[in-house]
Image (cartoon, coloured by chain):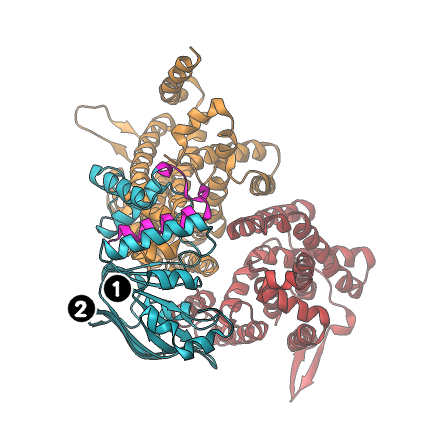
Amino acid sequence: MKDRSASFVRRLLPFLAAGALVVYPLALPRFYSSLAIEIFIMALFALSFNLMFGYAGMLSFGHAVFYGIGAYTAALVLKHAAESMALAIACSMAVSFVAALVIGFICVRFTRTYFIMLTVAFGELVYVIGHRLVGVTGGDDGLVGIPIPQISLPGLPVIDLSNMRVYYYFSLVIVAAAAVVLRIIVKSRFGHVLRAIRDSQQRALFLGLNVRRHLLLCYALAGLFAGLAGALLVPFEGMVSLETLHFSTSGNPIIVSILGGTQFFLGPVVGAAIFILVKDTVQNVAEFWMLWMGIILVATVMFLPGGVVGFVARFKPFRSAAGIAKKEE
Amino acid sequence: MLLFLLASGLTLIFGVLRVINFAHGSLYMLGAYFTYSVAVFSGSYWVSLLAAPVFVACAAGLIERFFLRRLYVREHEFQLLLLYSFVLIIDDATKAFWGTSIRMVPKPAALTGSIEILGRAFPTYTLLIIGLGPLVALALFLALNGTKIGRQVVAASLDREAASAVGLNVPFLYSVVFVFGAWLSGVGGAVVAPLRGASPGMGMEIIIMSFAVVIVGGLGSIWGAFLGALLLGEVLAFGTLIVPNLIVLLPYAIMILIFLVRPQGLLGRGGG
Amino acid sequence: MAAILETRDLCLSFGKLRAVDSVSLSVEEGALTSVIGPNGAGKTTFFNLLSGHYRPDKGAVLLKGQDITGLPPYVLVKMGMGRSFQITNIFPELTVLLNVCVALTASTGKSYDCLHGLRSSARTVSEAVSIIESVGLGPYVDYKGSTLSHGDRKLLEFALVLAIKPSIMLLDEPTAGMNQEETNNTVRLVREISREKGITVILTEHDIDLVFSISDRIAVLNQGRLIALGTPGEIRSNEAVKKAYLGEDA
């Protein structure tokens, strides 16, 4: 009897969660939608990072480059080309992907410490270039006054993305779709090859795998999804600033993934929720939320190496729920 | 030469502990702020020059002893992440405690003014900073090769297990190196405080430059750090004359160039 | 029978140390050749030269008549070379089954496939299972690599090397750290690989009895030089070899 009710709950859980997600913005004031959108964007950014780190073992401290490039590309498209979200997103993903191929080509030839330093170097380089190209990026002021597009699909009412509640559903759909794609990638042959490379590059080489090329593809895909996250940021904030390219922004997906648990597919998602909630809570009371984030991170690194999801997965009743999130088959 | 103070500590810590101290810039910043507070409290710059680096060293000691040390057995990445977390903590705590405006520290009377060399006047203070570099390099060289503990440190950096097998207290040596590297950062902060004051962003500014110096010179090589600091200093100096707009790009461009051409740096050992 | 692997005057020095000194030998296809020698003789360095880890200062390595000197490991694998390592190299976070599936996927060139699951091809899975069973790890199919015992890990490494269908296998101290039962198991496997599957095997070992019992030919290195090459019988009576091992019962 116990088994049947446990599995019943387990199968019901995703439906309950989906239901909650759908009802959420309707039941709560607009502010909560805005909060949720922040979580979705951060979750996607972190998921893209974790593809590199959790699965392939590449710790990049310069991932904001692609997030920022995605954001600026989308903004420029919306401002100067056409008020089409589809075009903006497509361009963002394409440009970030190419940028990631170029930067990644140099970076993946190195491992560990050198890789990390190189990603930092590129991060700073792009930030400084962005700062200088005032004509393109608006420099310190950033790009403002970006028209927020509407989506008109035949047969459906016009979708006004400037409406926070509408944008909630829009970003939820995009992020969920991206997550599904990432999950497919992660479960694929390529995904397992990445995990093998992470375990032992030498053994992977000795199976005939061109390790560098695989890592490059992983890096580029991570850049692509980060670019998508950046693109989603634009209609949400109505502007883009250099902060999206800053070193501290690169740190965010790292913090988020560690918090949630890098060895679990949905770890970064959980981490994003915690991160944004803590940030918001602390910011209302005090100014220095990074301090608390740092403390939480220290605690996580020291005592919860598997992140929150890893910790929760230790308890049997949650194992089934974590099973949905768990990476290992 | 300020860069050298930081770069040498960074490269020393990497050479022995095999970890890039992300928190190095923050410790430097703490050095500057401690200098400010001690100077205000005691009224003397010299006292703060002595005391501030010691405070920084203590802070670093606590970090190493109670946090970093526990992570040596774990994967490399965790140590880096821990140090990064402390960057967040230190940077924000500094803002909370000292506020966000720049804290100026008055130059000690003895060091204001300028000295004439070959007919041109050089600010005394700047000369001192420049002179400090080779002095510290020499001192480090002598310490590592001449003193017993210096040689133990070198041994531990070459092979941790062999060192502990022959009876060296490796955890202690690691602490010594980390604390000493932090002390050097603190000195850097104390020295720069009268020149540029203590500001919240100074840690971030200098850390990435320091990375560039260390990479160019070669991770783990102190003379490399010296050379790298010299080189980068010269490049920046000339750069201001020739391409003032792009000067900010130069350190990173050089860093990437070095990776492409000679990843182990000028004097480093081992590759990527 | 043709020589499948040949080295010509292979030299490598680390600074002043001549790790491998003018080693020329050829290995026949399908033969089982052991490389032995006292500690520090240069066996592992020699292996590393064969498998593309090091670039020799002088000399050449030829595989099936083609010059492979200095080619990176993953190219050599595609040419049919497989290698096991002294310190066992498997994928500890993956299960035994996934380990072998990855190896099979790598050899079929589908490693960039982002759409299909690793176990989506039933053929791949059944092939993986049969390889796993052939090395004797059948009951451990779903165990994570990190949970295996030392001996079982070496067996998994065997499975991985077999999965890429090599024509020549380099085994670096395959029985190191094994107990008697595991050693017997490994010997049986190696014999099977060599005799039944016809794969050329080159191995290095410290266990001299083992070497004498399974090898077709034995190469003896000392201080980087090849001092003897021949059948077990020839080596047993070789004076230079006895001197090199000084005090060891050959």
User: Which residue position holds label 1?
Assistant: C31
List the single residue furthest toward the bottom. B118
Chain corresponding to orange in the figure: A
Task: Give the magenta range.
Answer: C139-165
Amino acid residing under circle 2: Met
List the single residue furthest toward the right. B42
A58 and B27: which is toward the camera: A58
Residue A44 location in percent, x, y?
38, 38
Tell whether A24 sits left or right of B69. left
| Residue C174 appearing in the image | yes
Chain B: give its colour: red
Amino acid residing under circle 1: Ala
Residue A278 location in percent, x, y?
54, 33
- In the image, residue C142 lies in the stretch drawn in magenta: yes
- In the image, residue A253 lies in the stretch drawn in magenta: no
Looking at the image, residue A271 lies above or below residue C204: above
User: Which residue position holds label 2?
Assistant: C1
Residue A271 location in percent, x, y?
48, 35
| Numbered label attached to residue A130 | none
Q: Quadrant of residue B32 in the image?
A: bottom right
Q: Are marks 2 and 1 on the same chain?
A: yes
Q: Is the Cβ of the residue at disc 2 closer than 8 Å to that at disc 1? A: yes
Chain identity of mark 1: C
Tell whether B70 sits left or right of C193. right
* Of the image marks 2 and 1, the number of the one nearer the N terminus: 2
Label 2 residue SS: loop
Chain C: give its colour: cyan
A212 and C231: which is toward the camera: C231
List the single residue furthest toward the top. A1
Majority secondary structure of magenta residues: helix
Disc 2 residue crowd, few under 14, some 14–19, many 20+, Cα 10 Å: few
